[in-house]
Image (cartoon, helix red, strand yellow):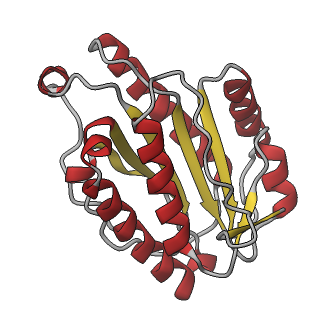
């Protein structure tokens, strides 16, 4: 699996916060890199990630307030990209290989988000509610029920938002049991439209005040990129 080319956050986090004291909206992209994504699906996902990064960079306020991380689950469960600003987020192609360790992927994404939210608070940065954005096309090949319990507990506590998107072939019964928020299915391979929606949604969040509800466009509208499971 190829890494995204960027420097991970380290000892200079507080210096970064001093230079940019804006509130932060953290989003973890939890992406399926299993073998079933090989071919057109992984190619469309890679192209969508590039469009997503470009769209966020074009929004000056989102560039200051949004941070993105990427966790992949396939042959390995990895933090592919630590949290970084859109300016430094330059995704390189992912490879599709291996099984679908969804439970381990969810746990890693939640741990990564919680750690970053803690860093914000320690650095005097006001956090927005974080987001985990899951994209998968298969059935889990590991134990996922305890991870689902963590997701639902976090949603009830309003610690984060959890969004699930199924690609053709996804186990919709499992997706429906992971989070309190209803999952959706991607129309075909409309990753470009999906990531445009996500970048627009994060931009809308960044223009609001932390803790202020934001009405996001319905992705399952008649002209949207998704259908309801």
From this view, report whether residue 210 is shown above or below residue 207: above
From this view, report whether residue 188 is shown above or below residue 228: below
Q: Is residue 70 visible?
A: yes
Residue drawn at 34 percent across, 69 percent down: 50
Which quadrant is the N terminus positioned in? bottom left
Toward the viewer: 70 or 76?
70
Toward the right, the furthest residue is 173
Residue 87 x/y as whole percent: 20, 51
Toward the viewer: 216 or 169?
216
Residue 141 x/y as whole percent: 72, 60
Residue 74 horizontal side relative to residue 138, left or right: left
Q: Quadrant of residue 101?
A: bottom right
Residue drawn at 62 percent across, 53 percent down: 217
Residue 156 x/y as whole percent: 74, 23
Circle count: 0
Q: Quadrant of residue 119?
A: top left
Which quadrant is the C terminus positioned in? bottom right
Residue 215 x/y as whole percent: 62, 41
Residue drawn at 46 percent across, 27 percent down: 128
Residue 15 horizontal side relative to residue 43, left or right: left
Residue 101 horizontal side relative to residue 182, left or right: left
């Amino acid at each position: 699996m190829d890494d995204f080319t960027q420097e991970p956050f380290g000892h200079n986090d507080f210096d970064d916060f001093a230079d940019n004291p804006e509130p932060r909206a953290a989003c973890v992209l939890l992406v399926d890199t299993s073998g079933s994504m090989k071919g057109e699906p992984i190619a469309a996902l890679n192209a969508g990630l590039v469009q997503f990064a470009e769209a966020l960079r074009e929004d000056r306020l989102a560039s200051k307030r949004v941070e993105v991380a990427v966790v992949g689950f396939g042959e390995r469960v990895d933090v592919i990209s630590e949290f970084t600003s859109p300016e430094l987020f330059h995704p390189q192609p992912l490879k599709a290989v291996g099984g679908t360790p969804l439970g381990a992927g969810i746990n890693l994404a939640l741990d990564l988000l919680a750690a970053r939210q803690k860093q914000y608070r320690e650095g005097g940065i006001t956090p927005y509610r974080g987001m985990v954005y899951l994209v998968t096309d298969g059935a889990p090949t590991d134990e996922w029920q305890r991870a689902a319990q963590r997701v639902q507990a976090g949603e009830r506590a309003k610690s984060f938002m959890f969004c699930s998107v199924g690609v053709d072939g996804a186990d919709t019964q499992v997706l429906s049991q992971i989070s309190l928020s209803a999952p959706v299915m991607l129309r075909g391979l409309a990753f470009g439209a999906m990531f445009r929606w996500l970048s627009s949604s994060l931009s809308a969040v960044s223009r609001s005040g932390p803790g202020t509800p934001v009405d996001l466009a319905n992705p399952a509208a008649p002209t949207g990129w998704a259908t309801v499971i």
